[in-house]
Amino acid sequence: MKREKKELNEADRLERKMRAARTWRDIGDYLLCMLGGVIYSAGVNLIVFPIGLYIGNYTGIAQIIQDILRHFFPGMADIRGLLLLAMNIPMLVVSFTIINRKFFFKTVLTIIMVTISMQLIPVKQIIPGITDTLTLCIIGGLVAGLGSGLSLRSGGSAGGVDILGVYLSLKHEGYSVGKVALIISLLVYAYTLFTFPVAIVIYSIIFTLILVYVIDQVHFQNRKIQVTIVSKDRGVLDLITKKIVRGASYWEVKGAYTDEPRYLITTVVSKYELIRLRRLVIELDPHAFLIEGTEVNVTGYFPSHFF
């Protein structure tokens, strides 16, 4: 009896220790999300905006809206941060309903920090002695990409294109995060092409490409996830091969508790495909369960579905 009690106390202490570790890890992630929002805002306000560049994302849309408003209200103050917040409110609703609560709260904090920082940090060139636009494009892309990627890597988002892309990819098979980002970029650059010199458009595109590349490196945007699914419905295989368009392997097994036949299915998907796969599997078989592993290295043929 004493031995059993001692083992229970030890298990309880281990559980408390693990819970405390998770709490501190979550606090660190929240702080990094906020820091990422500040770094992103500093990059665009202190490097990108002063040289007149446009960003091919929601920030670029906010720039366009402000330009239009200033046409009718000359001398209007810079409200790009507030416009970005207003456009992200619907995206917050989407993140709350289709992704998860931690992602939602981290995204809220990140968007708040971006809004406050963009309003408080002046649009002013602060790098002395550097006047070359291409150099500033590179530096701005590195700084802003680091901030945005840091927030994403910590489990949050600055909102906008990422969330909109995930939502549309869940609702419509023809959409992906990459396609939505491309559409937003085309809208921004179509506007700049007809209203600014071609050089502004070219440098804006260069900046955005650097921004996306840095985000990808910091965030592991195309991160691969191994998924093991246990289900009684063989239709899960069709979901993977026809809806998600990925390969899979499966075994016919039996449940140890019920001794009933099941399918043990394993596949590898991207993090965006995982969200859709979860929903489709649970809709098909509410009693199925999924095991997800994020530390996956794939050697061989694994085509990108980002676009």
Image: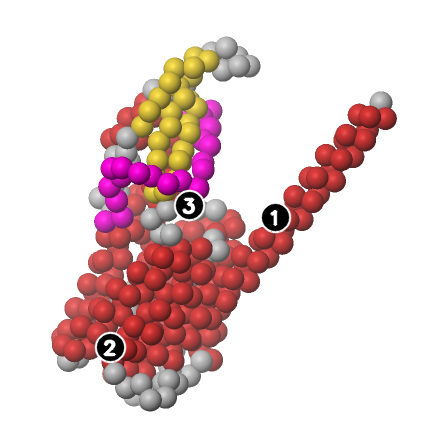
Element at label 1: helix
Q: Which residues are magenta?
A: 283-307
State which quadrant residue 77 falls in: bottom left
The amino acid on which the numbered mark 3 sits, given as a three-letter code, is Ile
Closer to the camera in the image, 27 or 163: 27
Q: Which residue matches tag 2?
A: 134
Q: Could you tell me residue 184's position as x and y percent? A: 25, 61
Q: CA distance from mark 1 to mark 3?
A: 23 Å
Q: Nearer the viewer, mark 1 or mark 2?
A: 2
Q: Residue at x 24, y 31 (%)?
A: 242
The answer to whether residue 156 is above or below residue 79 is above
Q: Residue at x 43, y 57 (%)?
A: 152
Q: Nearer the viewer, mark 3 or mark 2?
A: 2
Element at label 2: helix
The answer to whether residue 263 is above or below residue 133 is above
- Main SS category, magenta section: loop
Residue farthest to the front? 299
Q: Residue 22: which numbered mark, if any?
A: 1
State which quadrant residue 302 falls in: top left
Closer to the camera in the image, 300 or 219: 300
113 left or right, relative to 162 = right
Of the numbered discs 3 and 2, the one sitting upstream in the chain is 3
Q: Could you tell me residue 96's position as x and y percent? A: 46, 50
Q: Residue at x 27, y 57 (%)?
A: 181
Q: Residues within 10 Å of mark 3 (few under 14, many from 20)?
A: some
- Residue 62 in view here: no
Q: Residue 98: which numbered mark, if any?
A: 3
Element at label 3: helix
Q: Are marks 3 and 2 in contact (CB under 8 Å)?
A: no
